Image: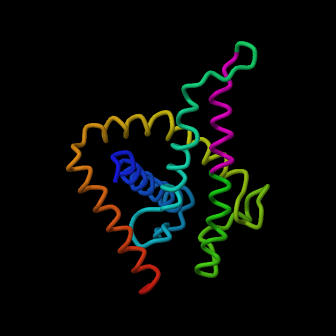
Amino acid sequence: MSEKIKKYIVYFMLYSIIGWLYEVFLEVVVYKWGFSNRGFLTGPYCVIYGFASLIFIITLYGLKKKKIKIRKISITPIVIFLGIVAIATSIELAGSYIMELLTGHWMWDYTRFAFNFQGRIALNPSVRFGIGGMVFLYILQPLFEKLTDKISEKALNIISSLIVTVLLVDCAYTFFYK
């Protein structure tokens, strides 16, 4: 496996864990519903956030360096924000259909929000994902890149292999025993 793929595996897990923490924070602190595992799998991670983060890295991360302007005003951040919203919303919609296909339901319901589609996606969460995606692209990802650049090749091999193993075991457990 290339070093880039190993780093992507680490990023995937980091953002999956951050997504899980975000979901639990909303559920426990903001909405005061009490705790439940907000991930599709058993572990403390939401893989939909991991997938979205990798797609953001691949499609939008390099765009930060470009200077997209209207007259003299840079609109690059606006273009990136709109890209994040579009990608995150598409992933969430696709994720709801995949979960429904696999389990008969999906894990969220946005029917209480205005501008929702079948309760699967809605404007409010899409805008929140856009804001979170900006934090991700402009603050967290540069920090995580600096951290992963400091990890030795041997340690990166071990960490990425452990992550893949944990995810495979969790998938097997979730699909066959849960």
Determine the main secondary structure of the stretch shown in magenta.
helix
**Residue at 33% in and 46% down:** 3
Q: In which quarter of the image is residue 68?
A: top right
Work out whether 65 lies above or below 128: above
Task: Pick the quarter of the image with the N terminus.
Answer: bottom left
Left/right placement of residue 100 relative to residue 46 reads right
Left/right placement of residue 59 relative to residue 86 reads left
The x and y percentages for residue 33 are 54, 67
Work out whether 51 lies above or below 67: below
Q: Does the magenta stretch include residue 86?
A: yes
Q: What stretch is highlighted in magenta?
A: 73-87
Q: In which quarter of the image is residue 174?
A: bottom left
**Residue at 62% in and 44% down:** 84
Q: Nearer the viewer, residue 109 or 89?
A: 89
Left/right placement of residue 127 relative to residue 143 reads right
Residue 132 at least partly seen: no
The x and y percentages for residue 35 are 46, 68
